[in-house]
């Protein structure tokens, strides 16, 4: 499951969508990154939204693998393999994205309430700051703090 999770994370959504829909490799533009943010920046809302959903789905599907295989493996661990795959994708020369969307997809399986809270934090911060990087970092920080108040099993 770790290998499958890694391979799922390695799917270069931004590169594939850019090449199939626009004939462009997003890595040649903007930040040079293949992730959701650069796809939005380079190719626009339609392509960016598709890549966002694909990248989230990679993390979600990876974290669901233990359930699909009726295994006792930790969904968070398998999801982490997808996150590593997104950052260091075998299908894109080990140069990937920052894995924010893939991480959020893992979070959806791990704890749906945290997923909703993280999205609210992200969207409010993005609205205020207009910077995805700030919204992502603040979302990660605050959802980690929130998990302490919920006495999250991972932290026990």
Image (cartoon, rainbow, N blue to C red):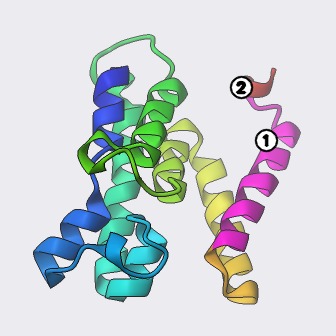
The residue singled out by tag 2 in the image is 154
128, above or below 118, in the image: below
- Tell me where residue 147 appears, x and y as whole percent: 79, 41
Quarter holding residue 63: top left
Crowding at mark 1 (Cα within 10 Å: few <14, some 14-19, many 20+): some
Question: In the image, what residue occupies the spot 29% across and 71% down?
Answer: 50
Residue situated in front as seen by the camera: 145 or 45: 45
Q: Report if residue 148 lies within the magenta region.
A: yes
| N-terminal label among 2 and 1 | 1
- Tell me where residue 2 appears, x and y as whole percent: 38, 22
The residue singled out by tag 1 in the image is 147
Residue situated in front as seen by the camera: 11 or 150: 11
- Tell me where residue 29 appears, x and y as whole percent: 38, 81
Question: In the image, what residue occupies the spot 33% across and 27% down?
Answer: 65
Q: Report if residue 111 lies within the magenta region.
A: no
Q: What segment carries the magenta color?
A: 133-152
47, above or below 101, in the image: below
- Tell me where residue 96 appears, x and y as whole percent: 41, 53
Q: Give the side of residue 89 with respect to residue 38, left or right.
A: left
Q: Which mark is residue 9?
A: none
Are discs 2 and 1 less than 8 Å apart at CB?
Answer: yes
Quadrant where the N terminus sits is top left
Residue situated in front as seen by the camera: 49 or 67: 49
């Amino acid at each position: 499951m770790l290998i499958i999770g890694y391979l799922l994370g390695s799917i270069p959504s931004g590169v594939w969508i850019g090449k199939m829909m626009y004939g462009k490799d997003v890595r040649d533009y903007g930040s040079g990154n293949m992730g959701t943010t650069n796809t939005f920046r380079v190719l626009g809302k339609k392509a960016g939204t598709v890549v966002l959903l694909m990248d989230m789905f990679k993390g979600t599907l990876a974290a669901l693998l233990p359930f699909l295989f009726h295994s006792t493996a930790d969904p968070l661990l398998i999801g982490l393999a997808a996150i590593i795959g997104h950052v260091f994708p075998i299908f894109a020369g080990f140069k990937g994205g920052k894995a924010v969307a893939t991480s959020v997809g893992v979070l959806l399986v791990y704890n749906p309430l945290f997923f909703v809270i993280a999205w609210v934090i992200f969207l409010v911060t993005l609205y205020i700051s207009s910077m995805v990087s700030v919204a992502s970092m603040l979302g990660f920080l605050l959802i980690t703090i929130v998990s302490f108040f919920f006495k999250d099993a991972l932290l026990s």
